[in-house]
Structures are given as C-alpha cells and as structure tokens.
C-alpha cells in the first residue's frame, strides 16, 4: 500500500493533456481508494479555460487516463466542462 501512495504522489505536478493534444492543466492532488489500493481520480488545477469553464479545478476520474509518463495523457475527456449555478450552491 505504501508503494502505491508513493507512486500516486509522483503524479502531482504532472501536466495533463487530452488525446487531441490539448493542455488540460496540472495534477494538484490525487484521490485514493485506500481499501483497493488504487487511484480513483485526480484534481487538475490551472486548467485551460477552453476546456473548463472559468479555468476552475476539475476532478478527473482515473479511468479516463490512458498513459502516465512525463505527462498524463487522457483517453477520454468531454468537449468542455461547464458548471451550473445549482452545483455551486
């Protein structure tokens, strides 16, 4: 379990790109499933306002990740993330 925590912390600071090559943002933090010992998601900050409304931070499910190396490459990402007024309350 400790190895997984150490490995997941290596994601922090990596740049995230869509499969189309668009810069999404930078990994700020990871969401862990401690019982399963796996990463569930990543909080991505400094987001591209073309992809995320108001350049807000976004939680990206780890199942959308297709590759991790010097960057994180997403195999899936919606065309754009918008936030409704209801979700901000």
Image: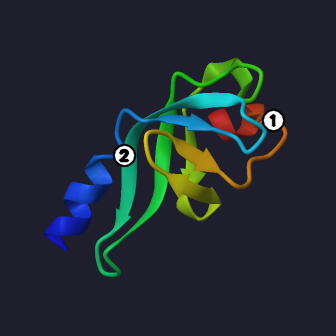
- Per the model, the C-alpha gap separating discs 2 and 1 is 23 Å
Position of 22 compared to 80: left or right? Answer: left
Quarter of the image for residue 21 reads top right
- Residue 40 point in image, percent of width and height: 47, 64
- In the picture, the disc for residue 80 is 1
* Up-down relation of residue 38 to residue 56 (above or below): below
Kindly state the secondary structure of the residue where label 1 is placed: loop
Residue, x 31% and y 55% (percent of image)?
A: 8
Q: Residues within 10 Å of mark 1 (few under 14, many from 20)?
A: few
- In the picture, the disc for residue 11 is 2
* Up-down relation of residue 16 to residue 47 (above or below): below
Point out the image quarter for the C terminus.
Answer: top right
Query: Which sits in the foreground, 14 or 40?
Result: 14
Residue, x 59% and y 65% (percent of image)?
A: 63
Residues at circles 2 and 1 in contact by the CB criterion of under 8 Å: no
Q: Seen from this angle, which residue lies furthest front?
A: 70
Residue, x 74% and y 34% (percent of image)?
A: 83
- Residue 10 point in image, percent of width and height: 29, 46
Say whether disc 2 or disc 1 marks the residue closer to the N-terminus: 2
Query: Which sits in the foreground, 5 or 55?
Result: 5
Kindly state the secondary structure of the residue where label 2 is placed: loop
Point out the image quarter for the N terminus.
Answer: bottom left
* Up-down relation of residue 49 to residue 5 (above or below): above
Position of 89 compared to 41: left or right? Answer: right
Quarter of the image for residue 20 reads top right
* Up-down relation of residue 47 to residue 7 (above or below): above
Position of 79 compared to 38: left or right? Answer: right
Query: Looking at the image, is mark 2 or mark 1 nearer the viewer?
Result: 2
- Residue 73 point in image, percent of width and height: 60, 47
Total marks placed: 2
């Amino acid at each position: 379990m400790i190895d997984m925590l150490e490995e997941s912390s290596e994601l922090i600071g990596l740049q995230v790109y869509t499969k189309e090559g668009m810069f999404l943002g930078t990994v700020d933090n990871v969401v862990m499933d401690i019982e399963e010992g796996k990463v569930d998601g990543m909080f991505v900050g400094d987001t591209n306002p073309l992809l995320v409304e108001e350049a807000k931070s976004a939680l990206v499910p780890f199942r959308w990740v297709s590759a991790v190396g010097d960057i994180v490459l997403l195999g899936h990402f919606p065309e754009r993330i918008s936030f409704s007024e209801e979700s901000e309350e």
